[in-house]
Structures are given as structure tokens and as C-alpha cells.
Image: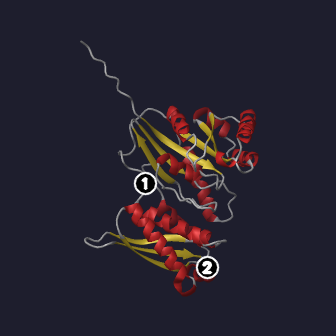
Amino acid sequence: MTIFIEIMSKKSGFVSVIGEPNAGKSTLINTLIGYNLSPVTRKPQTTRNRIFGILTRDNVQIVFTDTPGIINPRYKLQNLMKHETGKAIEGADVILFVIDLSGDVKHSLDVVMDEYKNFAEVSEVIPLICVLNKTDLVSDEQVKDVIKLISSSYKFSEIIPVSAMNGFNIGMLYDVIVSFLPEGEFYYEEGLITSQQERFFVSEIIRRNVFELLSDEVPFSVYVDVEEFREREGKKDYIRASLITEKETQKSILIGSRGEMIKKIGKLSREEIEEFLGREVFLELFVKVRKNWRNDPDFLKRYFRKNSAPANL
């Protein structure tokens, strides 16, 4: 008797997630992966670097790339952020174009399509999926109207309404992504959820808390530099990080009256870092001033080199 065993071939690929600031790109990736990997705050432009999240399930591995929101650059840092998005698109097997349904949908479409005028050509080669996010904030009729508008005016491989916040249609989106992935071996070992080092995510946790606790321009002017990350046998891991900002007045705000603000940032960050790492840490924070760092080419070169993903991506 002959027994036939069906062996499922592996599928793997890179999926870039693009869209305007605050469209919910980071929340979408976190929901798909099932882990809070990308920084999520109430403020736009939180993501500065490309963040790589890895989802491995059965015979499928998806490497998601969370990109900075599409913006008109006002300083050199934002020019580099824009460049990061471009690099992500170039290396993608699938592109997710995320739109906030609760905002001005037509404006969002026009902005992105104007930014990437070659999308019509790209979609002939790379599957371009339009993800209509935040269905929980609009009516079913509004969703239908938007789908009609997009279908009649733009060319997408698929249009899928979802709610990254409550998980609506996330399973369908996953299935559609998988259908477009090429066959191939996994890029990373199973069980790995990111290609970036722990210290990168430590800096992102600290920066996210700066965004949550402070308002106005201050959070956008802060760079978190993890200067030392040392495991100590029999003791808590030691982490020393500096919050680098552009002005003395911003430094004063970060420190706060009697050091209360920097203590609050440190306490929240330490708790989240311990949860992320699964072990106790001793976190020490400092505040430094480097004037106009967002327009300093040498500083930015070091910043993006230090926080970029490994070269094999």
C-alpha cells in the first residue's frame, strides 16, 4: 500500500506598512503579531525608524516593517524618516497602505498617491493592499461609501476594512497577506519576534513614555541614547540612558520640579522594560542638551546607524 503525505511548502516575505501619521500602522502590526512591538501613542509621528516585527505561524513567516508616517519634512531628521519609508517599499513583497477611516480619506489617498506616483507601476509587480482601519469609529454605510470611492478611483490588489484596536477582520487580512507571499524558506528562526536588539526597544519604551507624559514639541525633540546595557550575574541588569534634547528649557521640563518628571519617566519605563525583557533591571536616566540635533548630519548619521535593522535585511 502506498501512502501519500502532503508536505506544505513554506511561504515567507517582507510586508511594508505605510500611511499617514496616526493611521494606526503600529497598532495594526502589534495586533497581527500579538505583541506590543511598535510604539503606540496618541500623538502622530511616533515611529522614527523602520521597526521589524516577525510573525511565524505554521508554514508561514511574515516580516512586517513599521514605517514613519508620510510627512512633509521640516528638518533633516524627517528627511531621513522619509528615506526609511522609501527603503521599506523597495524591499517589500507586499505593501499595506493603511488609511484612517475616521479622518479625511480622500486627502489621505491623494497625499500618499502623490508621494508615490509610481504606485500604479508598483502594484503591477508588488501586491498593494488598502487597509481601511478604525472601522469601530465609523458606520457600516461610511465604510461601504469609502470602498466604492477607492474602487472607482484607485488601483489596489485588495481593499480590506479592519479595526486594529478590537481585532475586527484581522484574520481575513492575515489570510490575504499570506495568499500574496512567495514560497521560500524562513528568514529567521522560529520564535523570534524582531530582528532588532533589546537595547533598541529599551530606547523606544523610554521614548514612548516621554510622548505620553509630555506635551507640545518637547517629545519630538527628544532622542533616547542607551549608553550602557549590561547584564550582571546575580544582580539586576544595568541600563544607563540619556534623554537628549535641543534646548535648556526642554531639559528643565524633562527633569521637572524637584526631578519629579524624570522620576516618573524612569519608573514607568523600568516597569515596561522589565515586562519586555522578562527580568529585573536597574534603570538610570540622564538629560543632556545637544542643540539642533534634528538638523545635525553627523549626529543623525550615528542615530540611524545605531538604531537601524541588521544589514542582512
Residue depicted at 42% across the width and 53% down the height: 195
Percent across and percent down for residue 224 are 51, 70
238 w.r.t. 278: above or below: below
Q: Quadrant of residue 249?
A: bottom right
- Check disc 2 and report its element: helix, strand or loop: helix
Q: How many marks?
A: 2
Asked whether 28 or 196 is in front, the reply is 28
How many residues crowd around disc 2 within 10 Å: few (fewer than 14), some, or many (20 or more)? Answer: many
Measured as percent of width and height from the top left, residue 13 is found at 47, 40
Front in this rendered view, residue 80 or 195: 195
Q: Quadrant of the N terminus?
A: top left
Residue kind at label 1, given as amino acid type:
Pro
Return the mark for residue 310: 1
Where is residue 139? Give x, y as percent. Answer: 71, 43
Nearest the eye: 307 or 262: 262
> In the image, what residue occupies the spot 75% across and 49% down?
104
Say if residue 209 shows up in the picture.
yes
Residue beneath disc 2: 250
